[in-house]
Image (tube, rainbow, N blue to C red):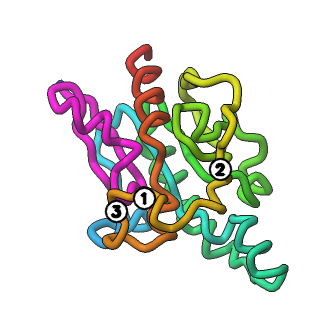
Amino acid sequence: MKKIILDLCGGTGSWSRPYTERPDEYEVHNITLPDYDVREYMPPDNVYGILAAPPCTEFSRAKHFHGKGKYQHNFLQGLEGVSACMRIILTANPKFWALENPIGYLVNWLKKPQYIFDAWEFGHDYQKRTALWGEFNLPEKSVLDKPDGIIKFSRLKSRDISPEYFGILDRQTRRAITPAGFAEAFLKRTDKE
Protein backbone atom coordinates (compact mmCIF):
# COMPACT_ATOMS: atom_id res chain seq x y z
CA MET A 1 0.00 0.00 0.00
CA LYS A 2 1.40 3.42 -0.99
CA LYS A 3 2.04 5.99 1.72
CA ILE A 4 -0.01 9.16 1.21
CA ILE A 5 1.92 12.42 1.45
CA LEU A 6 0.08 15.75 1.48
CA ASP A 7 2.05 18.75 0.22
CA LEU A 8 0.00 21.67 1.60
CA CYS A 9 0.52 25.00 -0.19
CA GLY A 10 3.06 23.03 -2.21
CA GLY A 11 3.39 25.37 -5.19
CA THR A 12 5.85 23.76 -7.61
CA GLY A 13 5.98 20.61 -5.47
CA SER A 14 9.70 21.04 -4.81
CA TRP A 15 9.52 19.78 -1.20
CA SER A 16 7.50 16.69 -2.15
CA ARG A 17 9.42 16.00 -5.41
CA PRO A 18 11.65 13.28 -3.85
CA TYR A 19 8.47 11.46 -2.77
CA THR A 20 6.87 11.95 -6.21
CA GLU A 21 9.95 10.38 -7.80
CA ARG A 22 9.23 7.17 -5.85
CA PRO A 23 5.71 6.37 -7.14
CA ASP A 24 5.87 2.73 -6.03
CA GLU A 25 6.15 3.84 -2.40
CA TYR A 26 4.40 7.22 -2.16
CA GLU A 27 1.22 8.83 -3.42
CA VAL A 28 1.67 12.60 -3.31
CA HIS A 29 -1.22 15.08 -3.24
CA ASN A 30 -0.07 18.65 -3.95
CA ILE A 31 -2.76 20.78 -2.30
CA THR A 32 -2.11 24.20 -3.78
CA LEU A 33 -3.89 27.04 -5.55
CA PRO A 34 -5.53 27.34 -8.02
CA ASP A 35 -6.73 23.70 -7.95
CA TYR A 36 -7.03 23.33 -4.17
CA ASP A 37 -7.50 25.80 -1.32
CA VAL A 38 -6.19 24.49 2.01
CA ARG A 39 -8.89 26.48 3.80
CA GLU A 40 -11.53 24.20 2.23
CA TYR A 41 -9.61 20.94 1.88
CA MET A 42 -10.51 17.76 3.78
CA PRO A 43 -7.75 15.13 3.87
CA PRO A 44 -8.29 11.51 2.86
CA ASP A 45 -7.93 8.65 5.34
CA ASN A 46 -4.56 7.04 6.09
CA VAL A 47 -2.32 10.05 5.47
CA TYR A 48 1.28 9.04 6.21
CA GLY A 49 2.97 12.44 6.16
CA ILE A 50 2.26 16.14 5.69
CA LEU A 51 4.58 18.81 4.34
CA ALA A 52 3.11 22.29 4.86
CA ALA A 53 4.52 25.54 3.48
CA PRO A 54 1.88 28.24 4.02
CA PRO A 55 2.61 31.61 2.39
CA CYS A 56 5.19 33.61 4.31
CA THR A 57 4.41 37.07 2.91
CA GLU A 58 2.71 38.42 6.03
CA PHE A 59 5.32 36.92 8.39
CA SER A 60 8.37 38.11 6.47
CA ARG A 61 10.73 40.52 8.14
CA ALA A 62 12.06 41.38 4.68
CA LYS A 63 8.73 43.02 3.85
CA HIS A 64 9.18 45.27 6.86
CA PHE A 65 12.81 46.19 6.11
CA HIS A 66 12.46 46.60 2.34
CA GLY A 67 9.38 48.75 2.97
CA LYS A 68 11.57 50.91 5.25
CA GLY A 69 9.30 50.12 8.19
CA LYS A 70 6.14 51.18 6.35
CA TYR A 71 4.85 47.73 5.35
CA GLN A 72 1.71 46.91 7.33
CA HIS A 73 1.59 43.16 7.98
CA ASN A 74 -1.82 41.51 7.81
CA PHE A 75 -1.17 38.75 10.35
CA LEU A 76 -4.81 37.60 10.36
CA GLN A 77 -4.63 36.94 6.63
CA GLY A 78 -1.34 35.07 7.03
CA LEU A 79 -2.69 33.00 9.89
CA GLU A 80 -5.60 31.78 7.73
CA GLY A 81 -3.22 29.57 5.76
CA VAL A 82 -1.32 28.43 8.86
CA SER A 83 -4.57 27.62 10.69
CA ALA A 84 -5.90 25.68 7.69
CA CYS A 85 -2.68 23.62 7.52
CA MET A 86 -2.85 22.90 11.26
CA ARG A 87 -6.53 21.86 10.97
CA ILE A 88 -5.60 19.38 8.22
CA ILE A 89 -2.68 18.05 10.29
CA LEU A 90 -4.88 17.54 13.36
CA THR A 91 -7.63 15.92 11.27
CA ALA A 92 -5.29 13.56 9.39
CA ASN A 93 -3.10 12.67 12.40
CA PRO A 94 -0.18 11.57 10.18
CA LYS A 95 2.90 9.61 11.22
CA PHE A 96 4.98 12.77 10.64
CA TRP A 97 4.32 16.40 9.76
CA ALA A 98 6.34 19.57 9.24
CA LEU A 99 5.32 23.18 8.71
CA GLU A 100 7.95 25.39 7.04
CA ASN A 101 8.38 29.16 6.95
CA PRO A 102 11.40 31.44 6.67
CA ILE A 103 12.55 32.94 9.97
CA GLY A 104 10.13 35.79 10.65
CA TYR A 105 7.14 36.79 12.73
CA LEU A 106 5.44 33.36 12.71
CA VAL A 107 7.44 32.47 15.85
CA ASN A 108 5.08 34.84 17.71
CA TRP A 109 2.31 32.23 17.25
CA LEU A 110 4.05 28.88 16.83
CA LYS A 111 6.88 29.64 19.28
CA LYS A 112 10.30 28.03 19.01
CA PRO A 113 10.76 25.88 15.89
CA GLN A 114 12.01 22.28 16.18
CA TYR A 115 14.59 22.84 13.44
CA ILE A 116 16.28 25.74 11.65
CA PHE A 117 18.34 25.38 8.49
CA ASP A 118 20.02 27.40 5.78
CA ALA A 119 20.08 26.37 2.12
CA TRP A 120 23.91 26.29 2.11
CA GLU A 121 23.81 23.54 4.76
CA PHE A 122 22.34 21.27 2.08
CA GLY A 123 24.79 22.14 -0.71
CA HIS A 124 23.25 25.29 -2.20
CA ASP A 125 25.23 28.49 -2.77
CA TYR A 126 22.93 30.87 -0.93
CA GLN A 127 21.70 31.66 2.56
CA LYS A 128 18.00 31.53 3.48
CA ARG A 129 17.21 30.82 7.13
CA THR A 130 14.14 28.63 7.36
CA ALA A 131 12.26 27.23 10.37
CA LEU A 132 10.36 23.95 10.72
CA TRP A 133 7.73 23.12 13.31
CA GLY A 134 6.20 19.68 13.70
CA GLU A 135 6.84 16.05 14.51
CA PHE A 136 9.56 14.64 12.26
CA ASN A 137 13.05 13.16 12.26
CA LEU A 138 15.64 15.93 11.94
CA PRO A 139 17.27 15.99 8.49
CA GLU A 140 21.05 15.59 8.53
CA LYS A 141 22.89 18.64 7.20
CA SER A 142 25.45 17.78 4.53
CA VAL A 143 27.60 20.92 4.99
CA LEU A 144 28.58 21.97 8.51
CA ASP A 145 30.93 24.90 7.88
CA LYS A 146 29.65 27.88 5.92
CA PRO A 147 31.64 28.09 2.67
CA ASP A 148 33.14 31.37 1.49
CA GLY A 149 31.12 33.29 -1.08
CA ILE A 150 27.66 32.36 0.20
CA ILE A 151 25.15 35.05 -0.84
CA LYS A 152 22.16 36.13 1.24
CA PHE A 153 19.03 35.09 -0.62
CA SER A 154 17.72 38.67 -0.62
CA ARG A 155 20.83 39.74 -2.56
CA LEU A 156 20.60 37.13 -5.31
CA LYS A 157 19.85 38.52 -8.75
CA SER A 158 16.34 37.66 -9.86
CA ARG A 159 17.63 35.51 -12.72
CA ASP A 160 19.61 33.37 -10.21
CA ILE A 161 16.57 32.48 -8.05
CA SER A 162 15.31 29.08 -9.21
CA PRO A 163 16.55 29.77 -12.75
CA GLU A 164 14.61 26.82 -14.19
CA TYR A 165 11.43 28.81 -13.47
CA PHE A 166 12.75 32.25 -14.55
CA GLY A 167 10.28 33.83 -16.97
CA ILE A 168 7.62 31.32 -15.92
CA LEU A 169 7.04 32.21 -12.26
CA ASP A 170 7.37 35.61 -10.57
CA ARG A 171 10.28 36.38 -8.21
CA GLN A 172 8.22 35.93 -5.03
CA THR A 173 6.99 32.49 -6.11
CA ARG A 174 10.52 31.41 -7.08
CA ARG A 175 11.84 32.64 -3.71
CA ALA A 176 9.45 30.21 -1.98
CA ILE A 177 10.79 27.09 -3.72
CA THR A 178 12.23 24.56 -1.25
CA PRO A 179 15.94 23.80 -1.81
CA ALA A 180 16.31 20.39 -3.50
CA GLY A 181 19.15 19.30 -1.20
CA PHE A 182 16.98 19.88 1.87
CA ALA A 183 14.01 18.05 0.30
CA GLU A 184 16.20 14.99 -0.37
CA ALA A 185 17.62 15.03 3.17
CA PHE A 186 14.12 15.30 4.63
CA LEU A 187 12.95 12.25 2.64
CA LYS A 188 15.96 10.21 3.83
CA ARG A 189 14.94 10.86 7.43
CA THR A 190 11.30 10.02 6.62
CA ASP A 191 12.45 6.62 5.39
CA LYS A 192 13.84 5.98 8.89
CA GLU A 193 10.38 6.28 10.50
The label nearer to you, 2 versus 1, is 2
Q: Quick one: label 2 or label 3, which is nearer the N terminus?
A: 2
Please tell me which residue is depicted at 60% across the width and 32% down the height of the picture: 121
CA gap, disc 2 and disc 3: 20 Å
Q: Are marks 1 and 3 in contact (CB under 8 Å)?
A: no
Tag 3: Cα neighbours inside 10 Å, few (<14), some, or many (≥20)? some
CA gap, disc 2 and disc 1: 27 Å
Please tell me which residue is depicted at 54% across the width and 25% down the height of the picture: 139
Query: What residue sits right under mark 1 in the picture?
Result: 9
The amino acid pointed to by label 1 is Cys
Residue 54 is marked as none
The amino acid pointed to by label 3 is Tyr
Q: Is residue 24 above or below residue 134?
A: above
Asked if residue 9 is among those painted magenta in the image, a careful observer would answer: yes
Q: Secondary structure at mark 3?
A: helix
Q: Secondary structure at mark 1?
A: loop
Q: Quick one: label 1 or label 3, which is nearer the N terminus?
A: 1
Question: Which image quarter holds the N terminus?
Answer: top left
Tag 2: Cα neighbours inside 10 Å, few (<14), some, or many (≥20)? few
Query: What residue sits right under mark 2 in the picture?
Result: 151
Q: Provide residue 82's location: percent of width, then percent of height.
A: 57, 59
The amino acid pointed to by label 2 is Ile
Q: Secondary structure at mark 2?
A: strand
Q: Are marks 2 and 1 in contact (CB under 8 Å)?
A: no
Q: Which residues are magenta?
A: 2-30
Please tell me which residue is depicted at 34% across the width and 62% down the height of the picture: 165
Q: Quick one: label 2 or label 1, which is nearer the N terminus?
A: 1
Residue sitting nearer the eye, 128 or 12: 128
Please tell me which residue is depicted at 21% across the width and 29% down the height of the picture: 22
